[in-house]
Image (cartoon, helix red, strand yellow):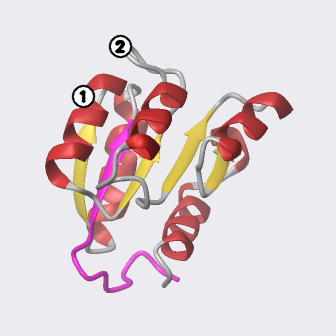
């Protein structure tokens, strides 16, 4: 799939506190015709998800306010959001972190250093059933 792929305007929420990474993924998603929501901390991410009901959430784990595991737990306990696919995109690569993320309900666990932005975009398409 290329960057020029035609999306259907589905909203994707990115919860990431690194301004460079956030900006890069916003650009990639917008080029793929997704609507992009952003949050720079876990509490704001959860609030944005509840308000805007995104089609998918790209979630960092190491975040201010609430960490990604706390956000994921809260999302999965919310009746309206529990089926929203969540992809964890993080630098935490320990086996126990990966297992915890998947046990909490993430559809995928991506270690930032191991995936190019293009590969992350392919994972998003897969999670959305494209």
Q: Residue at x 54, y 56 (%)?
A: 117
Mark positioned earlier in the residue sequence (2 or 1): 1
Locate residue 78, reporting x and y percent: 35, 45
Residue at the extreme left of the image, as rendered = 51
Q: Is residue 41 visible?
A: no
Q: Residue at x 31, y 81 (%)?
A: 7
Q: Residue at x 48, y 26 (%)?
A: 70
Q: Is residue 8 rendered to the left or right of residue 104?
A: left
Q: Residues within 10 Å of mark 2 (few under 14, many from 20)?
A: some
Q: Residue at x 44, y 20 (%)?
A: 63
Work out whether residue 24 or residue 46 is closer to the camera in this orientation and state it. 46
Question: In the image, is residue 6 part of the stretch drawn in magenta?
Answer: yes
Work out whether residue 88 or residue 31 is closer to the camera in this orientation and state it. 88
Q: Circle 2 — which element?
A: loop
**Which residue is denoted by mark 2 in the rendering?**
65
Q: Is residue 113 rendered to the left or right of residue 35?
A: right
Look at the numbered discs 2 and 1 and tell me whether their residues touch, using CB distance below 8 Å. yes
Q: Circle 1 — which element?
A: helix
**Which residue is denoted by mark 1 in the rendering?**
44
Cα distance between the residues tagged 2 and 1: 8 Å
Locate residue 108, reporting x and y percent: 64, 55
Range drawn in magenta: 1-15
Locate residue 2, reporting x and y percent: 48, 80
Place residue 103 in its image quadrant. top right
Note whether 124 is above or below 90 in the view shown.
Answer: below
Chief secondary structure of the magenta portion: loop
Q: Is residue 123 rendered to the left or right of residue 40?
A: right
């Amino acid at each position: 799939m290329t960057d020029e792929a035609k999306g259907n305007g589905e909203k994707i929420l990115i919860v990431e506190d690194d301004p460079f990474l956030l900006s890069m993924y916003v650009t990639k998603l917008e080029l793929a015709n997704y609507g992009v929501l952003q949050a720079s901390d876990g509490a704001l991410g959860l609030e944005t998800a509840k308000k805007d009901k995104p089609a998918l959430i790209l979630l960092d784990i190491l975040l201010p306010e609430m960490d990604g595991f706390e956000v994921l737990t809260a999302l999965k306990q919310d009746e309206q959001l529990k089926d929203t696919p969540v992809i964890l995109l993080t630098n935490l690569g320990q086996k126990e972190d990966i297992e915890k993320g998947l046990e909490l309900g993430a559809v995928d666990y991506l270690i930032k250093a191991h995936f190019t932005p293009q590969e992350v975009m392919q994972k998003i398409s897969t999670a959305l059933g494209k």
